[in-house]
Image (tube, rainbow, N blue to C red):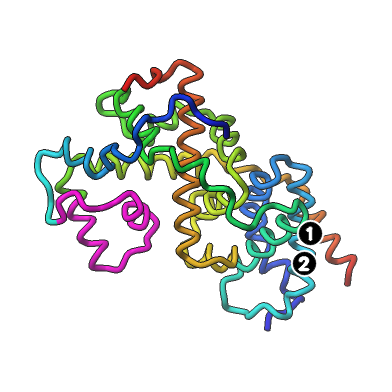
Amino acid sequence: MADQATFVEDTEPFMRSLYSTAVRLTGNRTDAEDLVQETYLRAYRSYGSFQAGTNLRAWLFRILTNAHINRYRAKKRRPDETELDDIEDLYLYRRLRDETRYGQSAEDQLMELFSEAEVVSAVEALPDAYRMAVLLADVEGFSYKEIAEILEIPVGTVMSRLHRGRKALQKELYEFAEARGLVSAPSD
Amino acid sequence: MSDDPRSESQPASEPSGADRAAERASTSGSLGCQPSLEELYRYMDGFLDDGRRERIRSHLEACGGCDELYHFHTGLRHLVGRRCQADLPPDLPQRVFKAITDLR
């Protein structure tokens, strides 16, 4: 049993990452603040049922994603996957590989190529179920098992959502790069 | 996302990442170029048992093509991780915890 008396000091260290995720889930700061507020209120009320010593960060993220799903009726079920089926896995990689400057790391190249606004817009364009998986894995660094517990889905579903989310993200990013003339249109 | 008229004409017959990596690699490790993209993701995300992880690691050391592909995906993961941070409004903790104190 966790003690409500220590709730503030126990949970405050996680507010920054919960807020970051809330901003990317809701798409704006005002709704994100409301979502964080609601998450903390819900967490406080049920803190007595939290098993002290277990994964508090994952528990808080589970409350956050559930609150988001309830508030915005976000689709928890699998989105229509057919629209992604024709995207090749290596979409962005294959195009950028030809533009790589010698000696530049992939990460430096990507950082140089895509602004924060573009990456955020690509993430926010993802269907909810994929976006949650990508945010929890790539931004928050949760393991597949933790994400499965947070979203209450099997680990295999986590992997497929993550794979599809990353694939869709690459397609979005590629379109930004192409729109700015940074990569040439496919010719093959 | 709408239909993309530029989509690859024959995605099913496109060589896989591992195949393309194999084309570019001069030598291959003990696995040949077997790791699929799913498996590279599991490696990147720390979701492989010790034996499989070690085999992938030594394959990446030996195979330039797969190593390049792997670095692209870790780069993309870091790009998303770094670009998606949002600064916490300085007064939010106080507001959140005041609402909780008011409940008491």
Q: Position of residue A36 (x, y in %)?
A: 74, 55
Callout 1, which amino acid? Glu
Between B61 and A127, the one lying in front of the other is A127
Look at mark 2 in the image and give the residue it sits on.
A42
Residue A38: give its label: 1
The residue at 60%/45% (across/down) is A127
Callout 2, which amino acid? Arg
Rendered image quadrant of residue A14 = bottom right
Q: Chain of mark 1?
A: A
User: Badges 1 and 2: C-beta atoms under 8 Å apart?
Assistant: yes
Does the magenta run of residues contain B53?
yes
Q: Chain of mark 2?
A: A
Task: Say whether residue A75 is left or right of residue B94.
Answer: left
Between A165 and A88, the one lying in front of the other is A88
The residue at 38%/30% (across/down) is B8
Helix, strand or loop status at disc 1: helix
B28 versus A98 height, above or below: below
Quadrant assignment for the C terminus of chain A: top left
Quadrant assignment for the N terminus of chain A: bottom right
B2 versus B27 height, above or below: above
A129 versus B69 height, above or below: below
Does the magenta run of residues contain A35?
no
The region drawn magenta spans B31-59
Helix, strand or loop status at disc 2: helix
Task: Say whether residue A144 is left or right of residue A149.
Answer: left
Q: Position of residue B84 (x, y in %)?
A: 57, 41
